[in-house]
Amino acid sequence: MQTVNDGFTRPQPQPGWIEVIVGCMFSGKTEELIKQVRRAHFAKQKVQTFKPRIDSRYHEKDVASHNQTRTEAIPVADADDIERLLEPSTVVVAIDEGQFFGDNIVDVATRLAEQGRRVIIAGLDTDWRARPFGPMPQLMAVAEVVRKQHAICRVCGGPASRTQRLISAVEDIVVGSTEAYEARCRRHFDPELGARRLTERTEPLSLSEL
Ligand SMILES: [Zn+2]
C-alpha cells in the first residue's frame, strides 16, 4: 500500500471491543441484546449469536426474552465452542446468559475483540443471593462498555437491581420459571426468603420447583 506522509491520520480498520449488558431478571437484558443484533443485521454485518446449552427453555435454537422476542442462537456447551464455531466473516458476536459460562469466556471474548470483532454479552450480574454471578464481574472489568439495566421493584415500584427468589433453593441454577422470581430493590430484597421456605416445608420438593 502506498504511504503518504502528509501529517494526517488515515482511517483505520474498526477495532474490536466488548460490551456487557447486565442487570437482574426482568430488566430487559435480552431485549437489549436482540436490539443490538437487529441493528447489526440492518447494517449488513454478519452476526452470530450463542447461548449456553444449559438454558433449554423456549426454543432450543433461539435467544428468547420473557416477552417472546427472539433471535436464532447456537447453543454451546462451553465458551471454547464459540471460537470453534465462529465463521471468519462474523463481525458481531452476541452471547446471552453469560453468567452460566465458565471463566474462560473472559479470554474468549478478549481474543474475539482483539481480532477486531464486536462482542456483546448479556447476563445476570448477581445471583439470587445478590452475589456476583459467574464470570460477569470479570467481563464487566475488561469490557469497553457496560450497560447496567434495572427492573421495577415488585414491592415499591422503585428501580430494582436484585433478583428475588420466591421458592426454596436447592441449586444455584433454576432456569426458566419466571414465577419463581421477581425483581426487588435493595431495601426489599430478602436473601433469606428461599432458605426460610426450605425449612418451613415438610414435604419434599417437586421437580418443577427446582
Ligand atoms: Zn422496593
Image: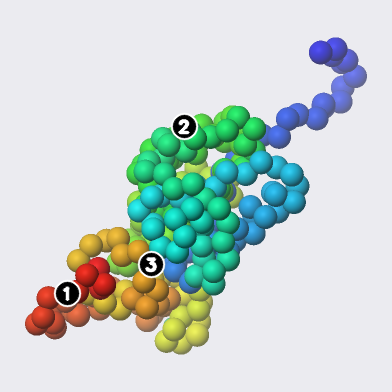
Asked if residue 114 is positioned above or below residue 46 in the image, the reply reads above
Residue bearing mark 3:
176
Question: Could you tell me how far apart the alpha carbons at marks 1 and 2 are, in whole angstroms?
Answer: 39 Å
The residue pinned by badge 1 equals 205
Disc 2, SS: helix
Task: Say above or below: 164 vs 63.
Answer: below
Q: Report whether residue 80 is seen.
A: yes
Q: Nearer the viewer, residue 97 or 19?
A: 97
Q: Quadrant of residue 130?
A: bottom left
Hey, what amino acid is under mark 2? Arg
Q: Distance between the residues labelled 2 and 3?
A: 27 Å
Marker count (numbered)? 3
Picture quarter with the N terminus: top right
Q: Can you give x and y, in whole percent of width and height, for residue 135 in the image?
A: 38, 48
The location of residue 103, given as percent across then percent down, is 36, 42
Identify the residue shown where x is 58% and y is 56%. 71
From what the image shows, is residue 115 above or below residue 98? above
